[in-house]
Image (cartoon, grey):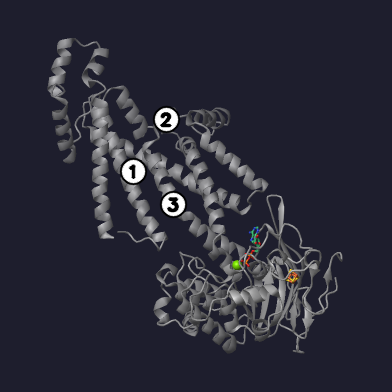
Amino acid sequence: MAMPVPTPSQPEAPLLRVRDLSVCFHSNGETVHAVNGVSFDLQRGSAVGIVGESGCGKSTVALALMQLLTRSAEISGGSVSLSGRELLSLNANEMRHVRGRDIALVFQDPMTALNPVLTIGQHLRETLSLHEGLSGKAAHARSVELLKLVGIAAPESRLAAYPHQLSGGMRQRVMIALAVSGKPKLLIADEPTTALDVTIQAQILQLLSRLRDELDMSIILVSHDLGVVANLADRVLVMYGGAVVEDGTAEQVLLEPKHPYTKALIAARPEIDSDRGTALCAIPGAAGRLTEQPSSCSFEPRCAVRMEVCSARLPKLAWDGAHGAACWHVAGASGEGQVP
Amino acid sequence: MTRFLIQRLILAIVVVFAVASLTFFALNLSGDPISNALSSAGASEEQIAEVRQQLGYDRPILVQYADFIASAATGDFGRSIYYGEEALPLVIDRLPYTILLASVAMLITIVVAFPLGVAAAMFRDRPIDRAIVTFAAFGQSVPIFVVGPILILIFSVHLGILPVSGAEGRGSVILPALTLSLYPLARITRLLRASMLEVANSEYVLTARARGASEIRVVLRYILRNALLPVLTVLGLQLGNLLGGAVIVETVFAWPGIGSFTRDALINSDFPLAQTAVILIAVAVVVVNVLTDLIYSLVDPRIRLS
Ligand SMILES: Nc1ncnc2c1ncn2[C@@H]1O[C@H](COP(=O)(O)OP(=O)(O)O)[C@@H](O)[C@H]1O
Ligand code: SF4
Ligand SMILES: [Mg+2]
């Protein structure tokens, strides 16, 4: 399928270009279509946020970019190109060299993300030897430098610590230090603050923002929380049912949302200053399981403004400049399926 | 650390005391060693009564018990009725054989089970894994008195490369150790496989891969190192079993270790000798358990001994 490529204003070739990425899981003789034709561009040095309810396929997209999905998953189609290099056709060894060096990943739960039997220093030395060829004094010096970079006080003394001796926020900083140790061009952060206290959350987001500027890194920030994403992202992708339903600059998506799901997300978000969490529960209903590839709007069962066409045909992203939404209410909408 | 050792020492004393008491009553309530031994030898009633009095078996059982515990506490375990010598040196003479047998069996267990467990986990659900899992299930269920004779038939009778029994011939420890290792080997293989598969799902394994760590590094440094922790505990327990539970193997192979010695002592109604052997085994098991805990604390930084 030749897709009309959305080309936002930047003329420069994007750092990351994802086209029609699809992932399904095979388990117990059943196929779950977790990601269905996701496309987006990420410019060098910019940050894109991916938001959506839990289960909409955000982590699957993140892991698919790294090709770190579980055995039961299959990337069933699409293309991922980084600086013009197609990643999906790389072999296992070539892909291993991309990980940590070109693309790095930070996960949600810093409690379980570090090897409990290795010290912080051992973790750092391992990646530094892997990506920078450093060892001995040079590796030690660089380790201290990295811990300092991510805002860890008394870095020298932390090198000998084991993960369980550090707080959650501190561990997440270590994870970030490890992630940037290979000087990646792209950092994918999957719910990096979800497991942390509110105050620590803000610090970690600030840290990511600072590192983006200092290290000239692009960032993909994945979160179920629109507020977290709004903090950092230049562009925002809204996902529902394994597909991107809205894509625009942060201002466009947050201030002039087009898709009913995005509008509901924003309406459901508690006022700033109130505690995080529970934000999305306010949208009635729950996303269905994707045992078949969608042939109609996945949001239709929960949509307050659905029409007849919505349950018959799948809307595609309709673009208004750099702002797209996949909804039959949006002007210029087109899609697939039988006209009712 | 010191506190840990003191605690464990106290616990060890309690355990050994309990084992000693249990053994004492189990034996002495089952009958009178002198009548058992001498009547089968054709002694008269008077002769039996005289020997009983000499050896103190005519006293009330609780008095005998108090005497036994008090003497044992000072290192005096009494005399063997059968050999007429001090029991402790007799038992200690047999200890090296048991330790040799248990060590070789443990060595075989580790050398075989570790690669098998790792291979099974790495090739999960493939033919290699299926074969290993089947072998392990077999190894865990076949009784020793079946395995022992089969090994003897193959290696001693047909191939003639290893002695049938006893401790004299070269390589004589191999067949009993092989037989003895089969169960722990199978158990450790399955445990290591399961443990590795569980650890493989950990987030720190995923993050290691995300940093570009090679597969061999991920398996050895991330999966195996963590998967070994539960295995270590069971290895310690199994070593304890090997030290104390080798009765059948030692009997089948006529191996002169503590297991067959204890069995003979029981058949001869030689209570002092049997008690001494059981107490010594209990001490060995307790020592192994403390060592296991110490090693565990060295390998897992999250564990602090206290
Ligand atoms: N290991 C897996 N096996 C089967 N299905 C999975 C697996 N991981 C994710 N999925 C499916 O993919 C969907 C998307 O999951 P995920 O990407 O984790 O969502 P998110 O990160 O947005 O919460 C889920 O609804 C789930 O049904
Ligand atoms: S396509 Fe229809 S059902 Fe889907 S979001 Fe738009 S209006 Fe609602
Ligand atoms: Mg997720």
Mark 1 falls within which chain? B
Reply above or below: A143 against A117.
below
Q: Mark 3 points at which residue?
A: B232
**Alpha-carbon neighbours of circle 1 within 10 Å: few (<14), some, or many (≥20)?**
many
Q: In which quarter of the image is the C terminus of chain A?
A: bottom right
Q: Quadrant of the N terminus of chain A?
A: bottom right
Splitting the image into 4 quarters, where does residue A133 fall?
Answer: bottom right
Reply above or below: B91 against B133.
above
In front: label 2 or label 3:
3
Residue A239 appears at what percent x and percent y?
A: 68, 71
Same chain shared by disc 3 and disc 1: yes
**Alpha-carbon neighbours of circle 3 within 10 Å: few (<14), some, or many (≥20)?**
some
The amino acid type of the residue labelled 1 equals Val
- Can residue A16 be seen in this snapshot? no
Residue at the image position 57 percent from the left and 63 percent from the top: B218
Q: Mark 1 points at which residue?
A: B285
Residue at the image position 75 percent from the left and 86 percent from the top: A8
Same chain shared by disc 2 and disc 3: yes
Q: Mark 2 points at which residue?
A: B248
Mark 2 falls within which chain? B
